[in-house]
Amino acid sequence: MTNVKTSPPANYVILVGLYITILLMAILNGVKLCNVFGQEFDGGLLPYAFTFLLLDTVREVYGRSHAIRMVVAGFFALITMSIVNALVMLIPASSAWELAKEHQAIMGFGLRITLAGITTFIVTQSLDLFLFSWVREKMQGRHLWLRYLISNVFGGGLDAFIFTFIAFYGVFPVVPVMISAWIVRTVFAVAGTPVVYMLVAMTRSWDAEKLIGKIFKD
């Protein structure tokens, strides 16, 4: 008997693509220190927080196994980015390029940011997935807002601690930034509650396969 492998849902593929793109942009922008209303945090904090929205959406709609696959895809994307970045850094810059030192300073520091990002990613995404699934089981599938907030508030706190410590320890005092980052992540989690409901509803109701079929006809 021939085994027929079914393709993953188009909606899921789109969510994974968004997840990986935002994840990589969060790491690349982690070198920037932001200040909003007196709260200091790295530039990748809010983009990275959005990956939790996408991960929780996939977990809610497609189940834990698909969410794990998305995390694995993100992990390999981070590893690939760090390798490519390191290789590009080894290539001598042209003498005609006036921004060589600036690029070296930012992207060289970006290697440390990438290490912080990979470590944070493994721990926090795993924790988010565990807490989301655990609360979902306890609530018997009810109260999406509760499992979303619990997983994000705890995951956000750990995210703020691990990333800030690895990325910026020795550069400036990290404790105030950790506290600010957790506050910002918590505010984002609360504000993102209606967004996760919207994403789940859109993923369940909108069929991207039909749109793809119209654009790319067989």
Image (cartoon, helix red, strand yellow):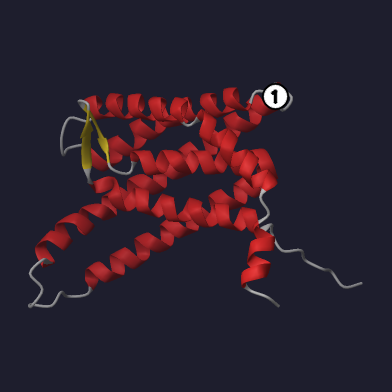
The residue singled out by tag 1 in the image is 142
Quadrant in which the N terminus appears: bottom right
For the point 87% across and 73% down, the residue is: 2
Above-or-below relation of 66 to 155: below
Mark 1 nearby-residue class (10 Å; few <14, some 14–19, many ≥20): few
Task: Answer yes or no: is residue 25 visible.
Answer: yes
Q: Nearer the viewer, residue 76 or 140?
A: 140
**Apparent side of residue 35 relative to residue 65 in the rendered image (left or right):** left
Task: Indicate the position of residue 179 as horizontal and vertical percent values.
Answer: 29, 24
**Apparent side of residue 16 relative to residue 133 in the rendered image (left or right):** left
Disc 1 residue type (three-letter): Arg
Outermost residue to the right: 1
**Apparent side of residue 42 relative to residue 51 in the rendered image (left or right):** left
Above-or-below relation of 14 to 133: below
Q: Nearer the viewer, residue 210 or 160?
A: 210
For the point 54% across and 39% down, the residue is: 126
Q: Nearer the viewer, residue 108 or 70?
A: 70
